[in-house]
Image (cartoon, rainbow, N blue to C red):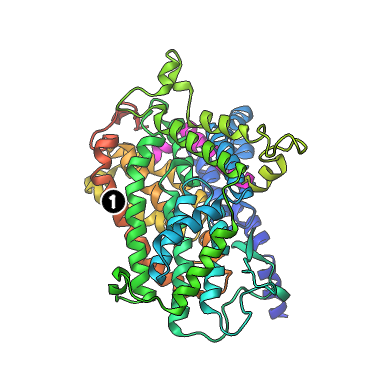
């Protein structure tokens, strides 16, 4: 009987948590009759639901629309307005571009071209795949970047590890490129494999040496980590960056110091430094510490290197010349980046200054949406075929992360509620004693906490929870809020430890080359590398970029943060 009871409790644990959490938190708003306590109830409830995923993340994100009007914190119409921001238009435009890149196969051409440029030595090959995935994740969703690159990686690995005739190759001699579809489930993600006979895992041949196994581990982990590392380099590269940007504009309306150009100047060096150090760390951990062979010039290549080179060259040759659709996508991509960089560069007037009376009205979202909608208008083929646009609405629907859009909207509503209720001012006063610590120590502690939490919760959830806490902390200790928020935002993307930490980790784990402990060992070192790289950036070249050493005029003065 007790076993059945335990089984029933375990099976219904999510429902039990949903039913028990609100009554346990209810004394807070009942005993403390203040809007701050009522908002804290909503904040704690959403945090628990987001962390445990007892209900879908997007469903939890809608709780402010229920509780804020009930508690009298905000009107229902005001809460609804908080759910849709400039961020969502930027996301739509970027997803349109990503959809075209994936639909017409431009991602494979980019990845294979980078790999052929670095050579077939295992370490250089890993760097090539990491650079390819990192570059893609600067412009598309991290999960999309991994799912674009991993089929090519798996094909190369199967060729390297092939034992016996026909392993890893189709009956017609062509290379078999498996794909993985990612689905959100409880506790993270589930990867559904396609084109696998009998639903077996993608696995290397049974007979392989320890070194072969280590090469597989290194390449798979490298691709997963590269997607997160590349994503931090640009504002649209990953959800936490976009959430931070919109939160900053919402909380500090007079702050116009974050845009595509200066974010790239700050974070691209961080991304490159992390990419190189992570590559070196994975080489040492999995491939070996002997790096002399990396600089070998000339000489006869091994049979394995010849086979690997042939696979990559055949794959690239099979793509044929660049198609019209790929060329058009490249043109739009380059144009979008140039318009982002030149909109308001800071050191010279940008093209937005042509709108003299309303230059601030035009944002990066305006550019992304304009060029994104072009894909719905431009024909994909010539007049000899029926009119078909570069992407269809069905293509867009498949790629658009609606869950993220709603999750981010819930975060904006929560942030607005903490401001309206006075909870943010109360938190600022509570945290003011931290001002006695060195500023760098406070930033480092915040980064460590965020990095720890993001291993267990989604990146978007983590940054949504911490932004309303860290910004009043910065105000309380009279530090430029950017000095705290930027490193915390970047560290939110450092979820490297577990397969369930983020979807890219789960995608590569599904290919069957990794154990959990492989990812834990590699992730610990990569987290340290990321934390040190971020702290280096905000204490050196980040200071003149954003005036981090001064308390800005756009932030509230000290007396405004006290209740």
Task: Give left or right: position of 326 versus 548.
Answer: right
Which sits in the foreground, 369 or 130? 130
Q: Residue at x 63, y 63 (%)?
A: 179
Viewer can see residue 516: no
Q: Residue at x 58, y 46 (%)?
A: 101
Q: Position of residue 517 (x, y in %)?
A: 46, 75
Q: Position of residue 268 (x, y in %)?
A: 36, 46
Q: Position of residue 393 (x, y in %)?
A: 71, 40
Residue linked to disc 1: 535
Label 1 sits on a secondary structure element that is helix
Viewer can see residue 93: yes
The vertical placement of 122 against 272, above or below, is below
Q: Residue at x 24, y 46 (%)?
A: 539
Residue 415 magenta-drawn?
Answer: yes
Q: Residue at x 35, y 46 (%)?
A: 267
The vertical placement of 410 against 359, above or below, is below
The part of the chain drawn in magenta is 402-427
Which sits in the foreground, 337 or 361? 337
The part of the image, by quadrant, that contains residue 154 is: bottom right
Residue 370 magenta-drawn?
Answer: no
Q: Give the position of the N terminus as an image quadrant.
A: bottom right
Q: Residue furthest top?
A: 357
The part of the image, by quadrant, that contains residue 4 is: bottom right
Q: Position of residue 436 (x, y in %)?
A: 22, 46
Which sits in the foreground, 449 or 381? 381
The chief SS type of the magenta part is helix
């Amino acid at each position: 009987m007790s076993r059945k009871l335990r089984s029933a409790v375990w099976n219904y644990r999510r429902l039990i948590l949903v039913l028990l959490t609100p009554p346990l938190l209810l004394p807070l708003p009942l005993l403390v009759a203040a809007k701050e306590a009522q908002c804290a109830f909503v904040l704690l409830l959403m945090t628990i639901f987001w962390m445990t995923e007892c209900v879908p993340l997007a469903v939890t994100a809608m709780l402010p629309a229920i509780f804020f009007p009930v508690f009298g914190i905000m009107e229902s119409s005001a809460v609804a307005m908080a759910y849709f921001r400039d961020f969502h238009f930027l996301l739509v435009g970027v997803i349109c571009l990503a959809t075209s890149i994936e639909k017409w196969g431009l991602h494979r051409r980019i990845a294979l071209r980078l790999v052929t440029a670095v050579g077939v030595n295992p370490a250089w090959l890993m760097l090539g795949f990491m650079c390819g995935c990192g570059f893609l994740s600067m412009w598309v969703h991290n999960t999309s970047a991994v799912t674009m690159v991993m089929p090519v990686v798996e094909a190369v690995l199967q060729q390297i590890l092939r034992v016996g005739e026909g392993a890893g190759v189709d009956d017609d001699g062509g290379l078999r490129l498996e794909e993985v579809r990612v689905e959100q489930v409880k506790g993270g993600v589930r990867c559904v494999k396609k084109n696998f006979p009998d639903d077996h895992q993608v696995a290397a041949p049974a007979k392989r040496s320890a070194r072969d196994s280590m090469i597989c581990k290194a390449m798979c982990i490298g691709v997963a980590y590269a997607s997160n590392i590349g994503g931090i380099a640009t504002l649209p590269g990953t959800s936490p960056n976009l959430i931070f940007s919109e939160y900053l504009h919402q909380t500090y309306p007079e702050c116009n110091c974050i845009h595509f150009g200066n974010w790239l100047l700050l974070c691209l060096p961080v991304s490159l430094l992390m990419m190189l150090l992570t590559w070196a760390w994975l080489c040492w951990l999995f491939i070996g510490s002997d790096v002399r062979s990396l600089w070998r010039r000339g000489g006869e290549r091994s049979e394995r290197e010849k086979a690997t080179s042939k696979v990559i060259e055949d794959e690239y040759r099979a793509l044929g010349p660049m198609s019209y659709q790929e060329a058009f996508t490249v043109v739009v991509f380059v144009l979008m980046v140039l318009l982002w960089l030149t909109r308001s560069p800071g050191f010279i007037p940008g093209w937005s200054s042509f709108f003299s009376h309303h230059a601030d009205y035009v944002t990066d979202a305006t550019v992304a949406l304009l060029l994104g909608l072009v894909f719905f208008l431009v024909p994909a083929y010539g007049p000899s075929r029926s009119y078909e646009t570069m992407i269809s609405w069905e293509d867009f629907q498949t790629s658009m992360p609606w869950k993220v859009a709603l999750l981010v909207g819930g975060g904006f509503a929560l942030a607005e509620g903490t401001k309206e209720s006075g909870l943010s001012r109360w938190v600022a006063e509570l945290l003011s004693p931290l001002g006695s610590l060195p500023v760098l120590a406070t930033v480092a502690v915040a980064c460590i906490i965020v990095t720890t939490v993001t291993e267990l919760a989604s990146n978007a959830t983590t940054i949504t929870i911490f932004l309303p806490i860290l910004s009043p902390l910065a105000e309380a200790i009279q530090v430029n809020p950017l000095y705290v928020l930027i490193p915390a935002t970047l560290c939110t993307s450092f979820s490297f430890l577990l397969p369930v930490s983020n979807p890219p980790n789960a995608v590569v784990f599904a290919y069957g080359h990794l154990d959990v402990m492989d990812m834990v060992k590699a992730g610990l070192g990569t987290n340290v590398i990321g934390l040190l790289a971020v702290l280096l950036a905000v204490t050196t070249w980040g200071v003149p970029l954003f005036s981090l050493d001064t308390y800005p005029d756009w932030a509230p003065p000290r007396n405004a943060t006290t209740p």
